[in-house]
Every structure is written in C-alpha cells, then in structure tokens.
C-alpha cells in the first residue's frame, strides 16, 4: 500500500506586521532583519481569529483541491506546539471540519511537526484501514514571543497549512523516503518552558501543604540563534541525504527543495551543501517569517497553486527546530 498527497491548502491571519512595525518596538531595522533572515513581513493573529480557525480553513482548501468530502476523512493529525487547548486542538478541528467519521490527535514537534505528521500518516496508511488522512501544520508562536526581545520577536509569524494524504497502490506511491531525529541535549538552545516551580505544591515549616495560586503559564521563546543556525546547517543536509538514500535517489533527482522557513541564510546554506541550484528552492519566508509547523505546507500550497510544483515533481522537504528535532521526507507530488 502506498500513499500520495492529493490536495493542499493554507490560511494566514489578516494582520501584516512589517519589519518597520517591529522597529517601532525594539532596536532593530528593516535592513538588519532582511539581511540576517530574509524576512520582510509576518502575519499575526488578532481579534476573533483563532489558530483552530486557520487550521480549518487550510484543511478545507486541501479537501477542495482533492475533491474529497469531510465524511471520507479517516484521521486528522494536527501538528502544533501552540494548541488553543493544552489537551490538544486536533479533535476540535476535526469536529469543526465535520469529519464525523474520523478521529484526531495532535503531534508536538515544533518546526519539525509537519514532517513528523506526514510520515505518521503514511505509516497509518501502510498499516491498512485508512484511506484519507488530513495532516495540518498550524502554529501561533506570536503567543509565546517576547516582544521586547529583538533576537526572537522578528522571526515568527502565525499560519496554518494542510495536505490530504490518500492511500494508493504501491506503484503510485508518492512518499518515497524519510529520515527523523531528535536530540534533547539541544533543548537548552531553543525552548518555551512551563513555569513549573510556580505551580507545584510545597510544604511550610510546619509540614503543612501549601497550594499554589491558580495560575499556569509558559515562558516566552528562549533561543540561542547562533547554535540553532549551526545545528540546522549541519543536520538538515545530512537528513535530506539519508531520506534520499531511503528513497533510492540522489540530490540531482530533486525538483524542489522545500525546507522549514526559518531563515533564508539557512535555506541557502543547505541548498549549497546539497548542490541544489537556487531556482529549485521554494521560499516564501519573506512574506510570513517562521510559522513553525505551518511553514512547509504553507509554502507547498503557494508553490502548487502558483503553478511551480507540478504533478510528478519530486520534493525534498525538511523540518527542524525545538526539541531539538529534525527530519526529512521525499515526496512525489
Ligand atoms: N536587530 C538588530 N540587531 C540585532 C537583532 C535585531 N533584531 N537581533 C540581534 N541583534 C544584534 C545582537 O545583539 C548582536 O549584537 P552584538 O554583536 O553587539 O552583541 C548582533 O546583532 C549579532 O547577533 P547574532 O545573534 O549573533 O546574529 P545572527 O547573525 O546569529 O542572527 C538570528 C540572529 C537571525 C536569530 C540567527 O541566529 C538565526 O536565524 N538563527 C536560527 C534561528 C532559527 O532558525 N530558529 C528556528 C527554530 S524555530 C522553532 O523550532 C520554534
């Protein structure tokens, strides 16, 4: 049993925040941000907009393109590190989509989440009993950004992207190979840690239990940008090469390099290491910044709808980020 991508969709918030807007709140400039990252604008959730709403819109786009009814979806995999409910967002998205014959769960793997979700979907299909699986990458990192920290607040945006993965014959298999990794030792370089100490029960000097005030929260995103940069340019090319090997291909067979959109310099460095020319590199980072688990399906959707990626094209997609986590998959569109 094989699996292939038969539809994609995406959605972004209305509010556009430019580099100049950020230069009003932290000491930075459009030039610094553009040169160091390639980012010009990002979209940020405001007002009544919700991450679940973006996820639903993105998934509807994927279902429309695939011409598959919500009733025919068996599973919804919501890849997010910023769900609107601590217990997960997938079930609510499944219900809002009207996928009444499906079940849903969340995957948390930061900016690698979508790649992990895609590979998980192919495993379910290979195991049998699943025909149509929606994989949604959706994140609202703006909720965890410290808007006074110029080292991180310039990077992130909110978005959702989705694909429909469908069972097919082995001959038509569009998921050709993969490679996945994690290294918790690198967590210190990138995290948003639960404020655990504030929430724990303690005891006073008499040994009586002291219950904490009712509050819970996470710290804002903490990042050592240089270390994350080094990790990405070292590990991502190796991972893509391993996924290509798994697929029985080499980098010369790649039509499109589609990396997690974190920094244009990371994208360029990985392409150079793999000897992939810039015309084969998909990038929309300038318009949306780093949208975490949404960045790959958002860029894919734009590339497909824009006529860049065509049926039969081979795409090397790679995610990397907090955890640390990283992984790649080779897709035939
Ligand atoms: N504007 C102006 N100056 C700044 C800014 C800013 N926004 N941010 C930092 N600087 C300053 C620093 O203070 C430093 O000044 P100093 O030399 O006086 O100390 C100088 O610029 C250089 O700072 P660096 O941090 O060394 O800059 P660098 O070239 O490394 O760029 C960046 C920083 C853009 C964050 C880069 O390291 C990067 O993109 N790293 C990767 C981040 C990433 O990809 N994260 C993905 C994971 S996302 C996830 O999983 C959630």
Image (cartoon, grey):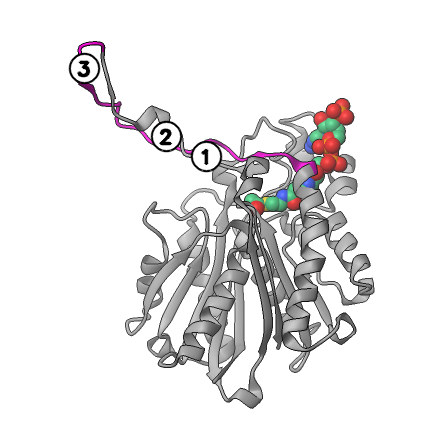
Picture coordinates of residue 45 (x, y %)? 49, 45
Quarter of the image holding residue 196? top left
Of labels 2 and 3, earlier in sequence is: 2
What is the CA distance from the residue labelled 2 to the residue labelled 3?
21 Å
Residue 207 numbered tag = 3
Is residue 65 shown left or right of residue 32? Answer: left
Picture coordinates of residue 253 (x, y %)? 75, 76
Residue 196 numbered tag = 2
User: Mark 2 touching mark 1, by CB under 8 A?
Assistant: yes
Is residue 21 shown left or right of residue 204? Answer: right
Picture coordinates of residue 229 (x, y %)? 70, 43
> Range of the magenta residues?
205-226
What is the CA distance from the residue labelled 3 to the residue labelled 1?
29 Å
Tell me what residue is drawn at x 70 percent, y 37 percent. 226
Q: How many numbered discs?
A: 3
User: Mark 2 touching mark 3, by CB under 8 A?
Assistant: no
Name the front one of labels 3 and 1.
3
């Amino acid at each position: 049993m094989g699996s292939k991508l038969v539809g994609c969709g995406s959605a972004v918030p209305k509010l556009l925040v430019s580099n100049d807007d950020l230069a009003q709140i932290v000491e930075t400039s459009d030039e610094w941000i553009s040169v160091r990252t390639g980012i010009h604008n990002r979209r940020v959730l405001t007002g009544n907009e919700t991450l679940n709403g973006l996820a639903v819109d993105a998934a509807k786009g994927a279902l429309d393109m695939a011409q598959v009814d919500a009733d025919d979806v068996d599973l919804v995999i919501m890849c997010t590190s910023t769900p609107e409910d601590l217990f997960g967002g997938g079930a609510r998205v499944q219900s809002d989509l009207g996928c009444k014959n499906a079940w849903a769960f969340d995957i948390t793997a930061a900016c690698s989440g979508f790649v992990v979700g895609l590979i998980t979907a192919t495993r379910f299909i290979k195991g049998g009993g699943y025909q149509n699986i929606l994989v949604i990458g959706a994140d609202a990192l703006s909720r965890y950004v410290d808007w006074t920290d110029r080292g991180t607040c310039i990077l992130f945006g909110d978005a959702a992207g989705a694909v429909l993965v469908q069972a097919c014959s082995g001959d038509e298999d569009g998921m050709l190979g993969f490679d996945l990794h994690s290294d918790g030792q690198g967590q210190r370089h990138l995290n948003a840690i639960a404020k655990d100490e504030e929430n724990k029960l303690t005891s006073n000097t008499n040994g009586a239990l002291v219950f904490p005030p009712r509050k819970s929260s996470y710290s804002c995103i903490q990042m050592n940008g240089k270390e994350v940069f080094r990790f990405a340019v070292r590990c991502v090319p190796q991972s893509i090469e391993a996924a290509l090997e798994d697929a029985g291909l080499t980098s010369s067979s790649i039509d499109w390099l589609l990396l997690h959109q974190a920094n244009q310099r990371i994208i360029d460095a990985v392409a150079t290491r793999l000897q992939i020319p810039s015309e084969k590199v998909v990038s929309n980072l300038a318009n949306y910044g780093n949208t975490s688990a949404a960045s790959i399906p958002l860029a894919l959707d734009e590339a497909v709808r824009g006529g860049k990626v065509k049926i039969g094209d081979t795409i090397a997609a790679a995610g990397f980020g907090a955890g640390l986590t990283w992984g790649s998959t080779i897709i035939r569109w």
